[in-house]
Image: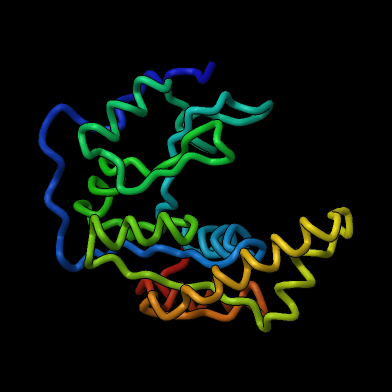
Amino acid sequence: MALASTRPLVSSSDLPEIKPQTQLTVLAGPTAVGKGTVSRDLIARHPQVWLSVSATTRPPRPGEVDGVHYVFVSEDEFDALVAQGRMLEWALVHGRYRYGTPRGPVAERLASGIPVLLEIDLDGARQVRGAMPDAQLVFLAPPSQAELERRLLGRGTENAAERARRLETARIEMAAEPEFDHTIVNDNVQRAANELAVLMGVAGQGG
């Protein structure tokens, strides 16, 4: 059973009003495109950016810290967050555990003028667009379809059916690019992170 977090995900008061000059940025893209690597590079050089911490109902893995890697909540707590409209986006993964972005911490930081980055999947990005239409959606693309396929199949451990499923998923994910406000090609991690920093308005503001 997942460990319940002792920290409130939202305050008892109403959620703070988001300042119009502070924009939420969502980074999404196909599986294996390198979203996590680009996000980590950005945060390392621009620590003033807050990378949202997802809530999950799964138990912590060895070495994971509550509130750092994930906010670990019970099924009942997650149900309450969804029912109260306190999740920007969420999904059931592999039919077992739920993951999502709590609205409160994001709203609080945006209201304080802190730039916020969400690194989530395509469906999550669509949910955020519905909940916060002013959010900036950035699509992280591979240098080419062939390179994405190489990354997806690089391990060589999948059977033919699994390889076909992965490639079809990648094709569907790539087709979502027109839904986004900007596209960054991840042909070089540092260059891609720099371009993301420019879009977020933090370029030249390293910590």
Residue 199, image quadrant: bottom left
Relative height, residue 142 to residue 135 (above, below): below
Q: Residue 161 vs residue 120: left or right?
A: right
Q: Nearer the viewer, residue 26 or 196?
A: 26
x, y percent for residue 66: 50, 28
Q: Residue at x 68, y 80 (%)?
A: 145
Quarter location, residue 37: bottom right
Is 75 on the left or on the right of 80, as rendered?
Answer: right
95 vs 187, nearest the viewer: 95
Q: Residue at coordinates 23% horizontally, 59% vertically from top-left?
A: 132
Which residue is painted at 22% across and 67% down in the image? Answer: 134
- From the top left corner, tell me how far across and down residue 179 is, in percent: 38, 75
Q: Residue furthest front?
A: 161
Q: Between residues 181 and 146, which one lies in front from this camera angle?
A: 146
Whether residue 200 sits left or right of residue 32 in the image: it is left
Toward the bottom, the furthest residue is: 144
Q: Nearer the viewer, residue 20 or 169?
A: 169
Q: Residue at x 53, y 64 (%)?
A: 42
Q: How many marks?
A: 0
Q: Residue 69, how many percent across, how many down?
A: 54, 38
Q: Examine the rendered structure and indicate whether residue 40 appears above or below residue 65.
A: below
Q: Is residue 174 left or right of residue 100?
A: right
Q: Is residue 40 above or below residue 176?
A: above
> What colour scheme does the image use?
rainbow
Q: Quadrant of the N terminus?
A: top right
Residue occupying the far right of the picture: 156
